[in-house]
Amino acid sequence: MRLHLLGTAGYHPNEFRDTPCLMLPECGLLLDAGTGMHRLRGLLETRSLDIFLTHAHLDHVVGLTYLLGLLHDRPLERIDVHGEAEKLQALDEHLFSPFLFPVRPAFTWRPLAGPVTLPDGGVVRWFPLKHPGGTIGYRIDWPERSLAYVTDATAEPEASYLAHIRNVDLLVHECFFPDGWEERAAFTGHSCLTPVAQLARQAGVRRLVLVHLNPLARETDPFPAGVQSVRPIFPDTQVGQDGMVIEF
Ligand SMILES: [Zn+2]
Ligand SMILES: [Zn+2]
């Protein structure tokens, strides 16, 4: 299974990174719809798309408006946008207000109720995360592999969501701050480097990729001291880059 990182910055894009969007082309799955959505077109392999939103902050949703142009000459049979009911309602009312974006792309809102089974048999589950306004993380299980996506949350070695990400093959976790910014991280609902690595170890995940990086930090390496400092805690730690393809 291939995971494409289409956007790895938090908050706003910079010269090297777009805002959050992950894609698994083989199963027509997108996680979040940030500015990285513009990279979707060349990767379409399926006749349908399932887009799962973590929350409705603009850096995670603005790309929904891009679908109109991206799919204009490549209409799909089905596009479902999944998320918490109140977040979808807010997007319907505000992001797609005629004053903001007058033409609605052809998708259907799908408020999350129970686990969602993807066309390829993968099962998507979600769990609540603490963040201003609230957000959710996702875990997707296939018979042969598993993936968890946690963004806009504050990692701790014993985080409340640890059980939901336990033993996944690939954990894609946010890491907006380097170490030393713990107070700011807790206040804004984001993570520092070391606690993310500690959590990955505690959860027994196989591999860790960091996303939702601070766009004002150095573009290609947002961690001034690199991630070597956490390799003794969790060896397979990698900084996500836009365009990166991860086989898992
Ligand atoms: Zn964000
Ligand atoms: Zn947010």
Image: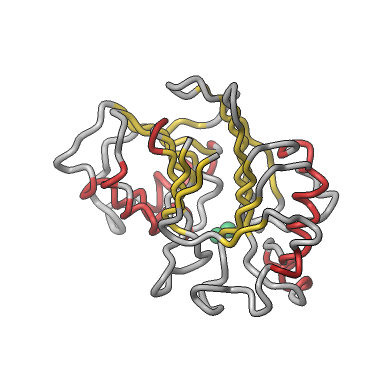
Which residue is painted at 68% across and 68% down in the image?
227
Seen in the picture, residue 61 relative to 26 is either above or below; the reply is: below
Q: Which of 147/237 is in front?
A: 237
Q: Give the left or right position of residue 218, taking residue 157 as reference.
A: left
> Quarter of the image holding residue 196?
bottom right
Seen in the picture, residue 192 relative to 29 is either above or below; the reply is: below
Seen in the picture, residue 142 relative to 163 is either above or below; the reply is: above
Which residue is painted at 50% across and 32% down in the image?
111
> Quarter of the image holding residue 240?
bottom right
Q: Give the left or right position of residue 164, taking residue 143 as reference.
A: right
Q: Residue furthest left?
A: 73
Q: Which of 189/179 is in front?
A: 179
Residue 226 position in % (x across, y down): 65, 73
Which residue is painted at 43% across and 36% down in the image?
29
Which residue is painted at 38% across and 38% down in the image?
25
Query: Which quadrant of the figure contains the C terminus?
Result: top right
Seen in the picture, residue 234 relative to 121 is either above or below; the reply is: below
Q: Count how many numbered circles sit on residues in the image.
A: 0
Q: Which of 6/160 is in front?
A: 6
Residue 90 position in % (x across, y down): 47, 47
Residue 149 position in % (x across, y down): 60, 45
Q: Residue furthest right?
A: 158
Q: Give the left or right position of residue 208, taking residue 230 as reference.
A: left
Q: Which of 165/236 is in front?
A: 236
Residue 9 position in % (x across, y down): 50, 64
| Color encoding of the figure | secondary structure
Quadrant position of ligand 2: bottom right
